[in-house]
Image: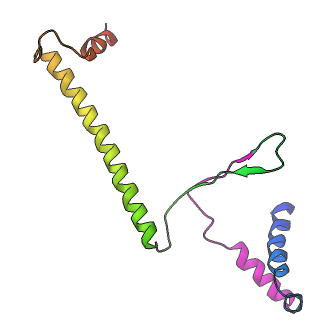
Amino acid sequence: MTTYKSNQRHAHVKQLLGKMDPAVANSFSYKQRKALQKAISTRDWDNHKIDFRPTLALPFVPWSFYIVFLGGVNKRSLSSTERFTAALLFLMALFVIGLIIFGVVFVVLYLLKSWLGIDIFPNESLGIWDEFKGLFS
C-alpha cells in the first residue's frame, strides 16, 4: 500500500471525526478509530465493472471539473422514478435497435430485389444497387 493511499484513508477518518463535536471525537479510542478506518476502507459500493472518471482542468480557470461514467450491476432497490426512467430508457433502446434492424432488412430486401432485376417503378432508382456493385468491381 502506498503512502498516499494510507494518508488518504486517514484523511477520511479525520474528516469524519472533524464533523463531530470535539468532545465526542476525542472520546474515540485507538481501536474505535481503527474500526472506523476499516469500515470506510471496505466499501463495496465503489467497485464497478466500468469506472471512468476523467478530470478536466481548463487553463486560466481556478476550478477543475470531473465527469463520471460508471457501469455495473445495481445492487440497491430503485425508487419509482428510477424504475420509470429505466423502463423508458429500455423502451427507447428497444425502439432504436428496432429501427436499425428494420433499416438493415429494408436495404437487404432492396438489394435482393435489384439483384433479381425486379423493377417496380420504371426509370426510378435509389442508386444503392449501383453503389453496391461498384464496391465489387
Observer-nearest of 54 and 58? 58
- Horizontal side of residue 56 vs 96, given as left or right: right
Q: Residue at x 78, y 42 (%)?
A: 58
- Horizontal side of residue 35 vs 70, given as left or right: right
The answer to which image quadrant residue 32 occupies is bottom right
Observer-nearest of 5 and 88? 88
Query: Which stretch did the figure color magenta?
Result: 28-56
Q: Farthest residue in the front direction?
A: 61
Quadrant, the N terminus: bottom right
Observer-nearest of 80 and 132? 80
Whole-percent x, y for residue 94 in the image? 32, 50
- Horizontal side of residue 118 vs 3, given as left or right: left
The answer to which image quadrant residue 19 occupies is bottom right
The mark tally for this picture is: 0
Q: Farthest residue in the top direction?
A: 137
Tell me if residue 78 is in the magenta stretch. no
- Horizontal side of residue 107 vs 22, given as left or right: left
Quadrant, the C terminus: top left
Tell me if residue 45 is in the magenta stretch. yes
From the viewer's perspective, is residue 75 above or below residue 127? Answer: below
Whole-percent x, y for residue 42 in the image? 68, 74
From the viewer's perspective, is residue 12 above or below residue 48? Answer: below
Q: Residue at x 21, y 14 (%)?
A: 125
Whole-percent x, y for residue 115 in the image? 16, 16
Whole-percent x, y for residue 49 in the image? 55, 57
- Give the color scheme: rainbow, by chain, secondary structure or one colour: rainbow
